[in-house]
Image (cartoon, grey):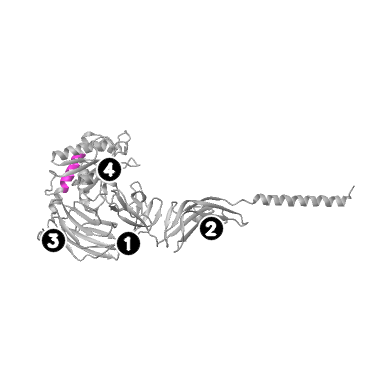
Amino acid sequence: MQYSPSITRCLLLATLALTMALLGKAQTRARVVPPFITSVETVPAADQWLQPGDRLQVRLVGQAGAQATFLNGKPLTELPASQAKGLRGVYQGTYVVQPGDTLHNRRLLFTLTTRDSSSVMALSKNTVRFLDPSQPQLAATKGQLAYLNYGLGEDRLGGAKLGYLDSAVVLHLTGRVGNQYRVRLSETQAAWVPREVVRLLPAGGFVPSSLTGSWSVQGDSLFDYVRVPLTQRLPYRSQLLTEPSRLVVDIFGATSNTNWITQRDGLRELGNVTYEQIQPDVFRLVLHLRHKQSWGYHVGYRGNTLEIRIKRPPEKMRLRGLTVAVDAGHGGTNVGATGSSGAKEKDLTLAIAQKLRRELEQAGARVLMTRETDVTVENTDRILLLRQRNPDLLISIHVNSSGSATVQGTSTYYRYVAFRPLSVALYEQMRATGLKGFGNVGSFNFGLSGPTEYLNALVETAFVSNLDDEKRLTTPAFQQRMAEAMRLGLEQFLKRTRASGVRGWLRKQPALE
């Protein structure tokens, strides 16, 4: 059959139009991109425990221009690129945990939905638990070096420590981020405790609290003691303050039922002892010291009685008869810093420590070394050894290093302001060797600076990363010069301490024995 030219032309046009329409639909279908999620996370990106009032923060990265939800439909907001480092498709959301919310260590489900109603889902890597306040989660400290942190921040020295705790202290946990639990200390104070130093207790326990009994103060041949009876081991914090010198101890969860304080014979270091109920659930002991310079103290439990042991000054402020601990930093597999010539910190500190030992022994001191050879000794083992041997003071010797070869000089470090005079005397004598000054550094969060039982200071002798300092550090004659400087620093500290003597107002008081 033949068609007329006009009909043929119409058929061709219709066929062309149909073809173009089909091609258009195909191209439209090809332009439809299925929704995608690149990542989902909690912020911070760690397993979390939250209680009512806490904020659960989350982030999703995926296709831009969509609708994102989490936690059964809670909306997320897409950030402008200007708030997301120039990226599109970054969604964030916050949910405030409400009373009665339940979530038991589950990963969070996220959904991303595009305008054509296509959806994709993803689960968070980390889990979240909502705590029930009616079932308190308790834990007990374990080991001999449990401690509390102020917050979650960390650097190479770890988190900033609030203080150490005895074993079997009961803690009320109100949250978790990663490997740290949040601890409720009082109505207005919280801290964080590392997971490895506590064990979780079974459900059904009560939030830790206690009334204080009437307490006693007494001395024996070695220490002065303060003993406060409680019904259970509560967390505490201690601070050694100056001007005037006093020890302040806060017991969290304790309320006063103290009706008298008995001061018995034998006291040598303690003056007035008082207390305050500074908050309904914080009981504060204020222990005034007779001497301007404190020589240390220990806080721990005997049963459920909190015992504070106050160290007395040496009878004579001289090296002869004094027990001095000398710590050669690093050792064994712990090499420490290394100089451009290959000099290792562990070898340099041991060489200087051995020379310091000879200097001190020649002056009549008893010397306790934390290591005498090139062996690995963990810092925790050093601390436990020193606690057991109870030296009068400690000098920890290290070698500094910097990413800049121009940085040089000597420095000393202390953690507690009451121990600063020792570090200052050492710094002055180290400067006298001709080394440049890098500074006297306080609140130093290093393991061996943490104990309160004895005076301690750390000496960063010089920078092995600096060519001039490295040459000094590797020269036996200059190692000897530094050892002599540390001995002179100790002598200077003792001389100044002797001169400061007993606090003026206590000189006028009769003996308490």
Q: Earlier in the sequence, mark 4 or mark 1?
A: 1
Q: Amino acid at mark 2?
A: Thr
What segment carries the magenta color?
482-493
Q: What secondary structure predominates along the stretch shown in magenta? A: helix
Say whether disc 2 or disc 1 marks the residue closer to the N-terminus.
2
Residue occupied by mark 4: 381
- Tag 3, which secondary structure? helix
Q: Is residue 157 magenta?
A: no
Is 16 placed left or right of 282 in the picture? right
Q: Amino acid at mark 4?
A: Asp
Which amino acid lies under the numbered mark 3 shown in the image of this protein?
Trp
Give the x, y percent position of residue 206.
Answer: 34, 60
Q: Which residue is the site of mark 2?
A: 69
Q: Nearer the viewer, mark 2 or mark 3?
A: 2
Q: State the residue position of label 3.
A: 505
Cα distance, mark 4 to mark 1? 32 Å
Q: Quadrant of the C terminus?
A: bottom left
> Is residue 373 in view from this perspective?
yes
**Disc 2 on helix, strand or loop?**
strand
Q: Which mark is residue 85?
A: none
Which residue was labeled with disc 1?
186
- The answer to whether marks 1 and 3 mark residues whose Cβ atoms lie closer than 8 Å is no
Foreground tag (2 vs 1): 1
Gap between marks 4 and 3, in whole Å? 41 Å
| Residue 487 within the magenta-colored segment of the rendering | yes
Q: Earlier in the sequence, mark 4 or mark 2?
A: 2
